[in-house]
Amino acid sequence: MVAARDELVERDAAGLTMEGVARRAGASKETLYAWFGTRDDLIGAVIEATADDSAQRVEAALAADATTVDDARDTLANYAESLLRLLTSEPSVSLNRAAMTSAALSDRLLQSGRQRIGPVVERYLAHLDKHRILRVPDPGEAYRTFFGLVVRDTQIRVLLGDRPPVADEIRDHAERAVDTFVALHVSPRG
């Protein structure tokens, strides 16, 4: 997977070949075709492997047991920072660009990314509501708001060729987004 991801970053979707990945991985083209079938299936496998790694990090980040608004803010800020780093990273940008070349890859990216991670974050937001830390009567809508505040137009600008934000910019933006989100959902109950 690493060889395929690195080849995709270096050559983009149009330049990715099974031969190039095989050479980089020290494997044969035949082996790659036997394992993955097609180039798009290989890209799909890279999407899923990346999503698996991301999902594990999100679940670990949100496993913190928030008991105060400050706990929730810290957890959400860590997640927001991680999300922005992921979405503007070279591998993610390359995978998104590759997914835009195929309806099947686009669907796989949505299923492996947003549709998989969204419910994890929504459960965390529901937990915050249940324990009266934040007021989140509709975790799905709250997640869409959170995602919009965090991502804004940053990902699309990077996909279109803008410079990705650096660590300090990501951290500052994540903190502002979380402060806004918390202000929208502060609980009058607690």
Image (cartoon, rainbow, N blue to C red):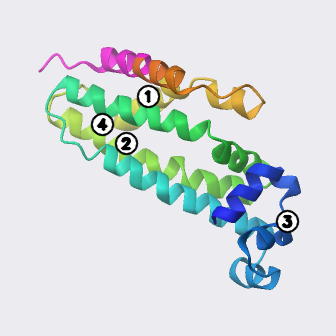
Quarter of the view holding residue 153: top right
Q: Amino acid at mark 3?
A: Thr
**Crowd class of label 2 (few under 14; some 14 to 19; many from 20; radius 10 Å):** many
**Which residue is rendered at x = 61% and y = 25% of the image?**
165
Disc 3 and disc 4: Cα gap in Å?
42 Å
Q: Magenta span has 179? A: yes
Please name the amino acid that badge 4 sits on.
Leu
Q: Are marks 3 and 1 in contact (CB under 8 Å)?
A: no
In contact (CB < 8 Å): disc 4 and disc 2? yes
Dots 1 and 2: beta carbons under 8 Å? yes
Q: Which mark is residue 182?
A: none
Query: Dot 4 corresponds to which residue?
Result: 125
Mark 1 vs mark 2, CA separation in Å: 10 Å
* Secondary structure mostly seen in the magenta stretch: helix
Per the model, the C-alpha gap separating discs 2 and 3 is 36 Å
* Distance from Cα at disc 4 to Cα at disc 1: 10 Å
Judge the density around disc 4: few (<14), some (14-19), many (≥20) Cα neighbours within 10 Å.
Answer: many
Mark 4 in CB contact with mark 1 (< 8 angstroms): yes
Provide the residue span drawn in magenta. 176-190
Helix, strand or loop under label 4? helix
- Tag 1 residue: 146
Q: Nearer the viewer, mark 2 or mark 3?
A: 3
Residue underneath mark 2: 121
Mark closer to the observer (3, 1): 3
**Answer yes or no: do the residues labelled 2 and 3 have beta carbons within 8 Å?**
no
Spot occupied by residue 182 in the image (x, y as percentages of width and height) = 31, 20
Query: As drawn, which residue projects farthest toward the right?
Result: 15
In this rendering, the count of numbered labels is 4
Amino acid of disc 1: Phe
Q: Please state which of the two labelled residues, at mark 3 or mark 4, is closer to the viewer.
A: 3
Secondary structure beneath disc 2? helix
